[in-house]
Amino acid sequence: MIRIISAENKSDYITIETLGRTIWEHHYTPIIGKAQVDYMLEKYQSVPAITEQVETGYCYYLLNFNQKTVGYIAIKPEVEALFLSKIYVLYDYRGKGIGKSAIQFIEAEAARLNLPKIRLTVNRDNSNSIKAYEKIGFKKTGELVTDIGNGFVMDDLLMAKLV
């Protein structure tokens, strides 16, 4: 059984930080290297970073599978789209419909907020994720290179899906 639960306190943020480290070290180290993974985890996936993001309009949710927290998502309503900031599932739990349920939840949130599309950024070398997004209807809409400090950049594709 898959449940999506609003993350609302420091304990939830600690769970997200821990999940983030596990998922990112496994998935992103081969793509962007350990130094950038460590930097980005601190900058974007730490308890202080999550707390600040929530204060500026991001909504975090825990993904539970059979009563075990196995992933998380973060979304932010914008003027003309719902921004899908994060969607992460532990490697051993992929292929069990968790990501699909999360996307359905995000689509329902966009509809509830009367937002006509969902947009996201994805690392251009993250080919498996790009293929997964395309399979569920996301289209490439552009490219974005962002200097994130400490000599690192995010080299992303922009993708969007109408809801």
Image (cartoon, helix red, strand yellow):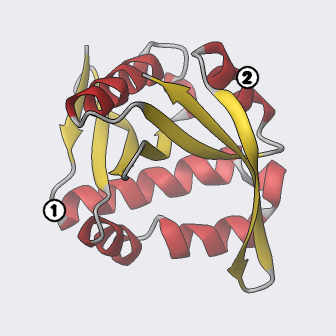
Element at badge 2?
Answer: helix
Which of the 4 quarters of the picture holds residue 34?
bottom right
Q: Residue at x 82, y 49 (%)?
A: 30
- Above or below, 109 against 148 in this view is above
Element at badge 1?
Answer: loop
Q: Nearer the viewer, residue 116 or 86?
A: 116
Q: Residue at x 65, y 54 (%)?
A: 25
The residue carrying mark 2 is 131
Q: Which mark is residue 81?
A: none
Image quarter in which the N terminus is found: top left
The residue carrying mark 1 is 9
Could you tell me residue 117's position as x and y percent?
A: 45, 32
Q: Residue at x 44, y 50 (%)?
A: 19
- Crowd around label 2: few <14 · some 14–19 · many ≥20 (10 Å): few
Could you tell me residue 65's position as x and y percent?
A: 31, 23
- Above or below, 109 against 42 in this view is above
Could you tell me residue 163's position as x and y percent?
A: 42, 22
Q: Is residue 89 visible?
A: no
Which badge, 1 or 2, is on the more N-terminal residue? 1
Q: Is residue 101 left or right of residue 91?
A: left
Q: Residue at x 81, y 62 (%)?
A: 33
Which of the 4 quarters of the picture holds residue 71?
top left
Q: Looking at the image, do the residues carrying marks 1 and 2 touch, with CB atoms under 8 Å apart?
A: no
Give amino acid for label 2. Answer: Lys
Residue at the extreme bottom: 150
Count up the numbered dots.
Answer: 2
**In front: label 1 or label 2:** 2
- Above or below, 117 against 157 in this view is above
Give amino acid for label 1. Answer: Asn
Q: Nearer the viewer, residue 144 or 24?
A: 144
Question: Separation of disc 1 and disc 2 at Cα?
Answer: 34 Å
